[in-house]
Image: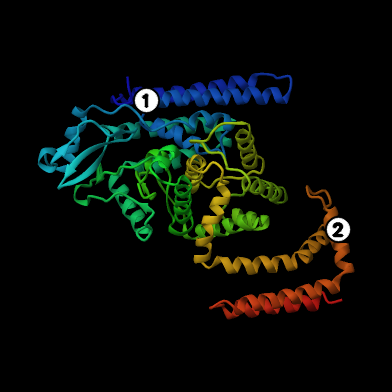
Amino acid sequence: MTPSQPTRGWLRSLSVLSLAVGAAYRSWRFSLRRFPSEAARTRAQDDLWRREGERLRASAVRLGGLLIKVGQFLSARADVLPESFTRPLGSLQDVVPPAPWATVKPGLERALGQPLSELFESFDETPLAAASLAQVYRARYRGRKVAVKVLRPGIERNVQTDLRAVKLAARWATRLTDWGRRFDLMTLWAELADITLQELDLQGEASRLERFSHNFENDPDVHAPGLVKELTRQRVLVMDEVFGVKPDDADKLKRSGVDPVKVARILIRSFMKQWMVDGLFHADPHPGNLFVQPDGSVTYLDFGMMGEVLAEDREQIRALTSSVIRQDTEGMVSALERLQFLRPSTHRARLKRAVGMLVNRLLSAPPPAQHGWQEGPEVDELVREIRFFLHDNTLQLPARYAFLGRSLGIVGGVVAKLAPDEPFVRLMASEARRYLTESGMGWQDTARDLFARLVSPFRRALEVLEKLDSGNLKMDVDLTPLIAELRTERRSRRAISLAILSGFFLIVAAFSHLPTVPQDLFWGAAAVLTLLTVVFRP
């Protein structure tokens, strides 16, 4: 049986449930085993998760449909699932054997309301591409070369069957196993159901395509295919056919006279805009969904899997990005907290140190990604660092942004091939500056950073005093530098007062060159700085 052949509902459900029951049984058997050391147990557990990931991958390839989406979805949840489990799923491609034309044509003509020969000047019956939910054909319509995307026959029934089976398996695992409760499988199932049902509505995809095109209508470097609205239905999407070079083929781009680094910058810039300005982002930007044109511009394809960033969260993403650029760990942690990335058990002091080390590491080397990344000792080490950062610092990725991390990882992999000598995070920082400036955050952050540096010694000194007063000295923070700083502060109050006054005049000078500055912000800053000089005068 191939994924293109319709599968009886009960047989598909049985296959999915047997996979889940088998995993639960093997997990139970593992819990009964005894190990000579914790290291031996960890190695054995990693091996168990790796084999479960390989089993899921094999079943997804065999059954197709929703299970491929399940595998891809779980591979994106490195924040909650073990790396040994998600790694085998990272290369799972949504490419399956096509459904026979004889089964596709009747449904296509029913959806369009008339025979294909009366609508199209020509129609190629050999699919251009075939995925788990839909396949694409070439055709000519009123002189235009178009691509016709149509849902696979019976896919809605198969998806509903699979969703019910996966939900049942997730519910059982949540009730009966520790790992099911720990990984919150029911929430993961809800995320998966939402994104899959969204992909089954091709009219909704057409709307997202139009919205994406509108967002980039003034950018000559980013395009989307033109839409044929009169032929678009819930099960059919017709758009202009697009050609080009895949962005992961750097050698071919060079032979075509296109600078791969320029393409990398276009990709990063377009995604920074999607994440920080537009709020609508492409959640599946693998090389098959991107084409580079002869002039170096990039055309996006396949808008079935899209994500949304809420307006209030876009502001925090800009704040987070600005903090990364300035390597302001306090700002990074505060932005992560407002984005709900922190769990109640998160240790803020430890997290600040980890964030600082990680950002410093990423600013000097390209990050790993699930797709298109060259393996090697350095990459493996960086992968371990990032996963340790996620798990050890008890961070969580909010459900609504499960695919934002996935898109970031895929883009990182593509950029790593296009610009292997350019640190990815540094490229992101340079391309993000324009959006921080356009949003008005540039001068605000500069002023805030200057002010924070001026008052930092006093704030940290007060923290030490509070800890001394409460007797809470057993913190996971070295207090020696802070105590030394407190003693230094007592000996140099006059110098600090002069520094504050100098900072005040610096801010006045900076604000005097800005065209529009809110009066309350200006005088508020002046009042606070003046008050500090009085409070801390010698």
Q: Amino acid at mark 1?
A: Leu
SS at badge 2: helix
Name the spot of residue 234 as percent of width and height, x first. Answer: 25, 44
Q: Residue at x 32, y 31 (%)?
A: 158
Q: What colour scheme has been applied to the protein in the rendered image? A: rainbow
Name the spot of residue 317 as percent of width and height, x first. Answer: 54, 56
Res. 285 visible in picture: yes
Q: Nearer the viewer, residue 67 or 259?
A: 259
Q: Residue 301 sits in which quadrant?
A: top left
Question: Image height check: is 189 above or below 99?
Answer: below
Name the spot of residue 278 as percent of width and height, x first. Answer: 43, 58
Q: Nearer the viewer, residue 219 or 422?
A: 422
Q: Residue at x 58, y 23 (%)?
A: 48
Q: Amino acid at mark 2?
A: Ile
Q: Earlier in the sequence, mark 2 or mark 1?
A: 1
| 283 on left or right of 523 | left
Q: Residues within 10 Å of mark 2 (few under 14, many from 20)?
A: some
SS at badge 1: helix
In the rendered image, which residue does mark 1 sit on?
A: 63
User: Are discs 2 and 1 less than 8 Å apart at CB?
Assistant: no
Q: Nearer the viewer, residue 192 or 179?
A: 192
> Which quadrant would the N terminus be assigned to in this image?
top left
Q: How many marks?
A: 2
In the rendered image, which residue does mark 2 sit on?
A: 483
Name the spot of residue 538 as percent of width and height, x first. Answer: 87, 76
